[in-house]
Amino acid sequence: MRQFALYLDNTVKGPLSEYEIQDMIHAGQVTAETLCAPVGSEQWEPLSRHFTFGSGLKLARKSEAPRPADGEAPPTPRLDVEQRRRLLMYGLADAATVDEIAPAQADALVARTEARIRGQITFHRLAAVVMLGAGAAGGAFAFGGDAFRSLLGPVADTAAVDEPASVKRWNRVLDEARRHEASALEALAAPFPEPVGGTDALPVFLGRLKVRENQAYVVETNVQLSRDALIAPLEKYGIPLGEKVAVLHFAEEIPEEQFRLARATADTLALILSPLLADGQFSRMMEETLGAFPDVADIPEAARLRVELGSLKANELGLGIDKVLFRAGEAERIAAGRGPKIVGNAKPEAYGTWARHLRDFAGKLALLRDRIRININSEARREVWSDFNRGPGAELAAWALAKAERTVETGENGALRLDEAPSLRADALPRRFLVRVRIQEDTVLLPWDCAFLVTGDCRSERIPNAVFLARESYRVVSKAETGGRRHVHRGEVGGRSLVIARESPRWHYISVARDRDNDVVTLRVDEALHRSLNPGQSLTVATLAKYPVHDKPTESNPAQGLLVDN
């Protein structure tokens, strides 16, 4: 039997058998001008080239129409109107022969034809439902076309021949097809979940952030030069003062020796700015200074040195200073275990403390000596100042230049701000700060708590971690891609397996690390970023924090109703 393709409503339908096309002709669904093409041909022709239209249609199954025996008279037409209409509509007879068919024969022919038509209609509906469900969702059935027809065709043929006996089987096939369609469409529409295990990236990067405590704060305070103690006296003596004031910040506490030099700087400055003393004031100062000798009962050398200094005269202060400094050096060697054997009950630590006190005492004697020089000769002020800056002052400046963590100039009204500094209290500032000023041609380093400076409160505020995190950068170590695996949905209709396939989504990963890291952070990123990156490129945390972090590259679990096709 030939089969044809029809061009209807701008769509190609078929292939259709001759019987199917005859049914369409009788139903008025096609005309003589409808284009058709026999299977295997690419030539489109009017349907009238292959089929007869009008009352000239012949019986489709003449062998099935009963005929009277030879010699018998034709029976009187006994067909009712409905029987005649159906015979003519189905092409089982034409106007010239329809009355020759007996009513029983007509009923049998019509019943057989209608059973066949119902089977064909049901077959096409079922095929359309199942195929449409797969096609609409982008799936692929393992059995389609001829294979699918071979699945449903025998059932449809059985239903057409022996409908009562095949109703249950046919309904079962229909139920299986409906269930398969529902589950297939659900499996095709079900979304693939994102890979499990993704966590917010920001806490991960914050947890890896290492901020040193000595760089975690902003310290704010203020310092200005005292007008009464410094600015006015310098103006009085016509000594120029630089406009800029800077603060040297030290990461560690200023050592004792350098702290003593800073104190000596302030004392020397106070000396050259002080007024002349009357004779009575000088005698009292001499007595007070010598009375401040650091005596220690357990150290025999202390008593002997005190007696020697008790008879000092004003012109012998230089000799006294040398004696004190000599004893200070000896005491330091004893404290370090390198000096003479200790006599008495004193401990080495006591000698170390006495040595520091002796050096302080030597400084007071030097101030007393210089004050005498100034009292005798007013021009000695400049000499005293120059001598100090060439000696102890230069020593302090050289140390400060090498050890200062940073130098910060003060702002308006003496405002001072240190970024990324340790938390500092006001009482700790004298051991962490030296204030630099320019007096005449000399750079002077003053201790924070001296009388020439007016200082304010100190505030330390911790810098948010986000500030440090924004400066971090990570380089790409490697890239990876997962997914793209075949997943299937399996079903059974009429004893045959049907398979729908889907591909899992592709996921893109990068692993990043800082130069100092021994491990990596793995993130799931979008495809565009993944394609644009190469190993070695650097990314800010602000960029990376948009994406989830995973322990390792993973892919989606199967969508509902699908299994990985191994």
Image (cartoon, grey):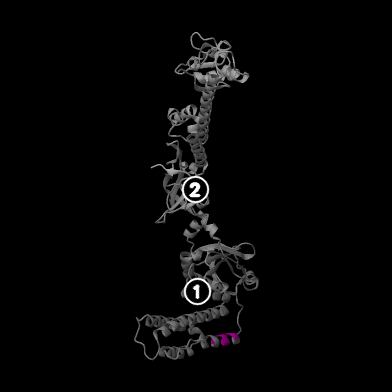
Looking at the rendering, which quadrant does residue 287 occupy? bottom right
From what the image shows, is residue 491 above or below residue 82? Answer: below
Q: Residue at x 47, y 75 (%)?
A: 256
| Magenta stretch: includes residue 414 | no
Please provide percent x and percent y for residue 348.
39, 84
Q: Which residue is mark 1?
A: 259
In the figure, is residue 424 to the left or right of 495?
right
Element under disc 2 = loop
Q: Residue at x 50, y 79 (%)?
A: 363
Element under disc 1 = helix
Q: How many numbered callouts? A: 2
In front of the other: 305 or 278? 305
Q: Tell me which numbered mark, 1 or 2, is placed earlier along the sequence.
A: 2
From what the image shows, is residue 522 above or below residue 262? Answer: above
Circle 2 packing at 10 Å, graded few (<14), some (14-19), many (20+), is few
Please provide percent x and percent y for residue 183.
50, 41
In the figure, is residue 103 to the left or right of 532?
right
Q: Which residue is mark 2?
A: 194
In front of the other: 176 or 254? 176
Please provide percent x and percent y for residue 140.
46, 34
From what the image shows, is residue 38 above or below residue 125? Answer: above
Please provide percent x and percent y for residue 450.
57, 74
Part of the protein shown in magenta: 281-286
Report the amino acid beneath label 2.
Glu
Residue contact between numbered discs 1 and 2, judged by CB atoms under 8 Å: no
